Image: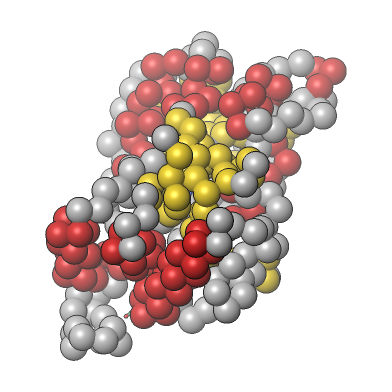
Amino acid sequence: MRYDVAIVGTGPAGLSAALNLKIHNKNIIWFGSKELSMKVERSERISNYPGASSISGPELNEAFSRQIEEAGLEITDRMVTSIMPMGKGFMLLGGSDVYEADRVLLATGTVQAKELPGEAELLGRGVSYCATCDGALYKGKRIAVICGAKRYEHEVEFLSELADTVYLFAQYSDCDIELPNVERLSSPITEIRGKDKSEGGSGEAASVSIGIAGPSGGVSSVITHDGKEIDVDGVFILRTAVAPTSLLKTLELDGTHIAVDRNMQTSVPGVYAAGDCTGRPYQIAKAAGEGNIAAHAIIESLKME
Ligand SMILES: Cc1cc2nc3c(=O)[nH]c(=O)nc-3n(C[C@H](O)[C@H](O)[C@H](O)COP(=O)(O)OP(=O)(O)OC[C@H]3O[C@@H](n4cnc5c(N)ncnc54)[C@H](O)[C@@H]3O)c2cc1C
C-alpha cells in the first residue's frame, strides 16, 4: 500500500501533523512509539503550553493518547532506519518492512547520543540499527549491542537467539537481561573499528538489507571506555532516534539540525521536518506549531499533483 504521507516520530510535532492530515482525509502511516515522547514524559511540570495552566509531562502524554484514540489515529510501532527517494515518492524501512509514501515528515526530535567513531562509516557494513532486519546475518557470530532503552530488550533477546555471543552495553539502569550467551559490559563502547575487505567478514552481507554497498570490509571490533578491544562481527545500535543524515543521506543540515524553509520543507523535495529536529527552542508549543505548518504545506503540495 502506498500512503500520501509517512510521519516519522510520535512527539508533539508528529501528533500535531497527524491530527491535521487526518482531518484533511490524507492516508497516513505514522511511525514511532506508543509511549509517544519520552521527553514529554520526563517533564516534571509544563507551565508554558497554551490551554494547560500547569500540567505534568505524563499528564500531557496521557491527554495526547486520548486525543489519538478519539481521532482514530494509529501508530505503527517501528523505528524507521532508512528513507530512500524512489520516483516521485519515498521508500521507508521500518523494522524489516518496506513502506511507500508520496511525502515524508520527519518529526524525530533531537538525537541525544552522538554517533560513535566508526558508526557512520560502517553503517550497513556490520553496523545496524535494526535487529529484525539484519539479525539473521549474524547467526553463530559475535556481536556487540548498544541498547538505548528498555523497550528494545526484546530485540536483544532475539539477537541472543541467533548470535553465538552478545556483548551488551545497556544505556539505562534497570536492564533485566540475564542470558547465558549475553555478556554485560559495564564500560560504554566508545569506538567501532573495521577491517579491509581483503580480510573478509560479514560487512558486505549486512549491507544488503539497507541497500548500502560499501567498498571496503566490515566491523572487526569495538573499543570500550576502559580501553578493552573486543573482536566482533557486527554492532547493533538500538536507539530511540537516529541522526537525520543516517535516515536520508542527502538531507542538508543547519549545524546539527535539519535545514528547513518557512513551510518546513527540507532540501529534499517532498520531505518536511518539524519540532526539535529543526532547531531551538526545544519547546512543545514550537513542535506542535511546526507540525501544523508542515501538515498544511504537505496538503497544498499534494493538491498540485
Ligand atoms: C526534562 C525535560 C523537560 C522539558 N520541559 C519542557 C517544558 O516545560 N515546556 C516545553 O515547551 N518543552 C519542554 N521540554 C522540551 C519538549 O519536551 C520538546 O521540545 C518536545 O518534546 C519536542 O517534540 P518533538 O515532537 O519535536 O520531539 P520528541 O518529543 O523528542 O518526539 C520525537 C519522537 O520521535 C521518535 N523517533 C525518533 N526517530 C524515530 C525513527 N527513526 N523512527 C520512529 N520514531 C522515531 C522518538 O522515539 C520520539 O518518540 C522538556 C524536555 C525535557 C527533556
> Residue 108's x, y, as percent?
47, 59
Q: Taking the image as four quarters, which one is ligand 1 found in?
A: bottom left
Image quadrant in which you'd find residue 95: top left
Residue at the outermost top position: 140
Q: Nearer the viewer, residue 260 or 188?
A: 260
Residue 184 visible, this angle? no
Question: Measuring 44% from the left and 70% from the top, which residue is drawn there?
Answer: 296
Residue 226 x %, y %: 59, 44
Q: Residue at x 65, y 42 (%)?
A: 87
**Direction from residue 27 to residue 133 in the image, left or right:** right
Residue 204 visible in the shown view: yes
| 280 and 17: which is toward the camera | 17
Q: Looking at the picture, does residue 177 appear above or below residue 22?
A: above
The residue sitting at 61% across, 32% down in the picture is 210
Q: Name the quadrant of the C terminus.
A: bottom right
Q: Residue 161: percent from the left, percent from the top?
A: 39, 16
Instruction: Pinpoint residue 172: horizontal percent, then vertical percent.
Output: 37, 50
Q: Quadrant of the N terminus?
A: top left
